[in-house]
Amino acid sequence: MSVAPAVAPEYGSVRRGTAAVRHVSPIAVAAVLVVAQLGVRGWVAGSGFFYWDDLILVGRAGTEPLLSSDLLLHSHDGHFMPLAFVVAWVVTAVAPLDWAGPVVSLLVLQAAASVAVLRMLIVLDTGRTGASSAPGWRNARWIILLPLVFYLFCPLTLPSFAWWAAALNALPLQAALAWVIGDAVLLVRTGRRRYALTGIAVFAAGLLFFEKCVVIPFVAFAVAALAGHIDHRSGAMRAVVRRAAPLWAGSAVVLTCWAAAYFAVLDTSAVRGDPANLRDLLHSATSLGIVPTLLGGPWSWARWLPSTPWAVPPGWAVVLSWIALGGAVLLSIRIRARVIPVWILLAAYVIAAQLPIALIRGGPNTAAELMQSLRYLADVAVVLAAAAALLLRAHPRTRRTATEPTDSGPEAGAAPLHTDDSASARRTIWRARARVGVVALTIAFVASSLWSTGTFTRSWAVSPARTYLTTVRADLAEGGPALLDQEVPWAVLTPLAYPQNLASRVLAPVAPDAFADSTPQLRMITDSGEIVPAQVWWNRGIRPGPEPGCGYRIEGEASVELALDGPMLDNGWTAQLNYFANRDGRVVAGMEHGRVVSVPIRAGLHTVFVRLVGGGSALRIASRTPGLDLCVGAGPVGVASYDR
């Protein structure tokens, strides 16, 4: 009896500490953690601004009605995302080109995803006791906070959150994936059909945000089957098939209907595939992307404007991350039963998440840094959290000790009573110390993740679009003659997005009437957003007309050709028309090959600048006002420019 007193004081303090902790609910702590995550993500979102595809969404929302097929059924770079367009339209209508609107939508979507993940973790944890009720919020254990903290603060989901256009795909995918996993497990456990209905509805909604949601039923099936396998349930696979059959059947119907719509609107020209550098892309995504984030990395980011930041973890950190991952795999297999299939599922999903992007986006001209941007891999965080919950759900491996009874008789396997008390106390103390170690590691992970979040945010905060849009909005508010359309700077939106990169599209939500096909005073928007006087280069010129003192006479609906001093390629050009008119009226003008535009004319001697799209060796002008007599003289046709 000499061992027990030596450990009794420490054992008593452990019990007192444990009793104090019991007064705090794990759900309350989880709620605080979710709020903390939203605070951090709010700071990240507030530091950003509209970026590239964001302006395409804003432009389409500003030029298309909400229920237009041109909006809802548009194939955006190969993505079919009608509900994402709906969110963008509503946000733009409420707060046109005001970044506060996207920030609010980002936080709402992130809150939905975080709550869905919390629910999934509770469902996976409470099922280990064999409970038939759901989802077991009151029975949640403290252990669920570990995978929850990982999901909430892991930098893996950060880049897709900060970019609004990417978040409108990624966050609904994360929320739907976690929710349907929870519904699948609950349906198998309880047999209640309402989980099939909600799972099908959430799956359908997810598909309308992002086509990658097609993976949801398959992942949900795998997780539900693994939950039964870990619990040593015989026929776990058959039970998942049979008891959750309504969910799988409904998902198949939804997937079939969605596929018909998807392939009807898919823009195949946006899908490019060339697996030339597949190995490099997969290495970048895994070793330089996903694995360092498991320890809160990558800690540093690189960026070449106007690209997004990409992860650049130190080499030693990559090695350390792989060692930590390998150790976690071996340790879990050693101390937990039946967990190898969980690791197989996780590895399969990580590879499956990378392959479509690597195959479609890859090619000899694709930089490996594309995969290090991490924005294509955010959903992996949900699967990692689910896998962690399954590992924690698994039963410890049992080992026979010297103190355990055997079949040889009561005396053969029994130890003295004081030895049992001593071993129990030591186990309690060891567990308390292990909890302290886990808490310390969790705090270290959060600190590491926050450091990575801070370095990302500093890089992401640099925004050419912020300067451009802020300045041009202020100048447009001062009024003035109409502007001719022009492309926004390349750093604001790529020319590959034409015609969505035209200023009239980007600024449509705040200045729908600021642009016209012609203007009496030529002005342009600079790369910094200032509106300044401009002039037309003499790329080509209108030759002097045949009629002395008039040039080219236009007096009827028959078009008159104004010869140029050379041919012009198909492009957007600005024509400076110097004219004299006997009255106010309207003419139509166009290049020899191209569309025509309507141009208002004022009585007297004036100049009008017209934006023409097309090419050829002449301009064509015709009157649309009876009695209008118009003379047009020589003038430049070319590129509009301003003094830099």
Image (cartoon, rainbow, N blue to C red):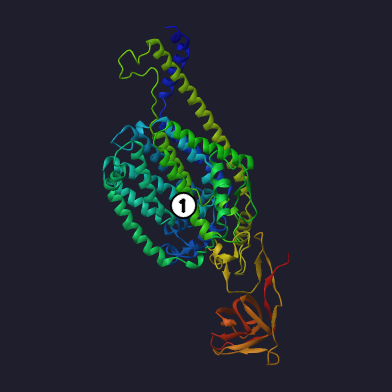
Residue at image mark 1? 352
Residue 224, quarter of the rendered image: top left
Nearest to the observer: residue 110 or residue 271: 271
Left or right side of 449 for 334: left
Q: How far across and how far down the image is residue 73, in percent?
A: 42, 64
The number of discs equals 1
Q: Residue furthest top?
A: 2
Question: Does dot 1 land on a helix, a strand or a loop?
Answer: helix
Q: Residue furthest bottom?
A: 547
Left or right side of 387 for 238: left
Is residue 441 visible to the viewer in this orientation of the structure?
yes
Nearest to the observer: residue 407 or residue 28: 407
State which quarter of the image contains the N terminus.
top left
Q: How far across and how far down the image is residue 233, in percent?
A: 30, 37
Q: Crowding at label 1, few (<14), some or many (≥20) Cα neighbours within 10 Å? A: few
Q: How far across and how far down the image is residue 299, in percent?
A: 61, 41
Left or right side of 546 for 112: left
State which quarter of the image contains the C terminus.
bottom right
Question: What residue is rendered at 49% in x and 22% in y?
Answer: 433
Q: How far across and how far down the image is residue 131, in percent?
A: 30, 34
Is residue 379 visible to the viewer in this orientation of the structure?
no
Q: Relative to residue 173, is residue 394 depicted above or below?
A: above
Q: Relative to residue 615, is residue 266 depicted above or below?
A: above
Question: What residue is rendered at 62% in x and 53% in y?
Answer: 463
Q: Residue furthest front?
A: 408
Question: What residue is rendered at 58% in x and 49% in y?
Answer: 48
Q: Relative to residue 163, is residue 578 depicted above or below?
A: below
Nearest to the observer: residue 639 or residue 231: 231
- Residue type, label 1: Ala
Q: Relative to residue 37, is residue 563 depicted above or below?
A: below
